[in-house]
Amino acid sequence: MIKRLDQPGVLVQGTKVRALLKVLAPHATIPTHTHPNHHVIVTALKGDVVLETPDEHLALAPGELAWLDEITPLALRAGAAGATFTVTLARQPKTATAST
């Protein structure tokens, strides 16, 4: 079976991977947040999306991808034409904490 995926929301949900389709109106934002224990891959599909961390900004044009670790706070902002992009979350093993 083949299905066209064109509606915003969850595309794939598994135990270790989740993929989402996101659509933002022109200049809309997703506030700063983190994805603990997940690596994040953002893929721009239409328009421009800007990834903003406390230390840097990265603008993605259609076809470009970005990777983010599990601890860096991230905000996303659409450009003047809005943005359509995917977010893929890959679960990472929890880091063992040292006991005293």
Image (tube, grey):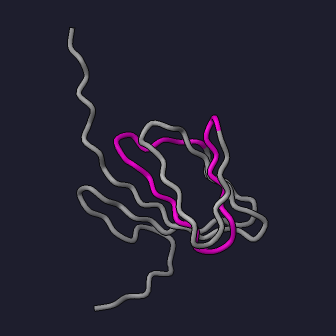
* Residue 62 figure quarter: bottom right
Q: Which of 8 and 45 is in front in this view?
A: 45
Taking 33 as reference, is 67 above or below it?
below
* Residue occupying image coordinates x 34% and y 41%: 37
Horizontal relation, residue 25 to residue 18: left or right: right
Horizontal relation, residue 79 to residue 85: left or right: right
* Residue occupying image coordinates x 31% and y 59%: 17
Taking 36 as reference, is 79 above or below it?
below
| Quadrant showing the C terminus | top left
Magenta span has 41?
yes
Residue at the far right: name it: 80
Taking 41 as reference, is 95 above or below it?
above
Q: Which of 32 and 51 is in front in this view?
A: 51
Characterize the magenta stretch by its predominant secondary structure: strand
| Quadrant showing the N terminus | bottom left
* Residue 18 figure quarter: bottom left
Q: Where is residue 81 in the image (x, y as percent from the top left)?
A: 75, 71
Question: Number of labelled discs?
Answer: 0
Horizontal relation, residue 89 to residue 6: left or right: left
Residue at the far left: name it: 99
* Residue 47 figure quarter: bottom right
Taking 84 as reference, is 54 above or below it?
above
Q: Position of residue 69 (x, y in %)?
A: 44, 43
Magenta span has 9?
no
| Residue stretch rendered in magenta on the structure | 32-55
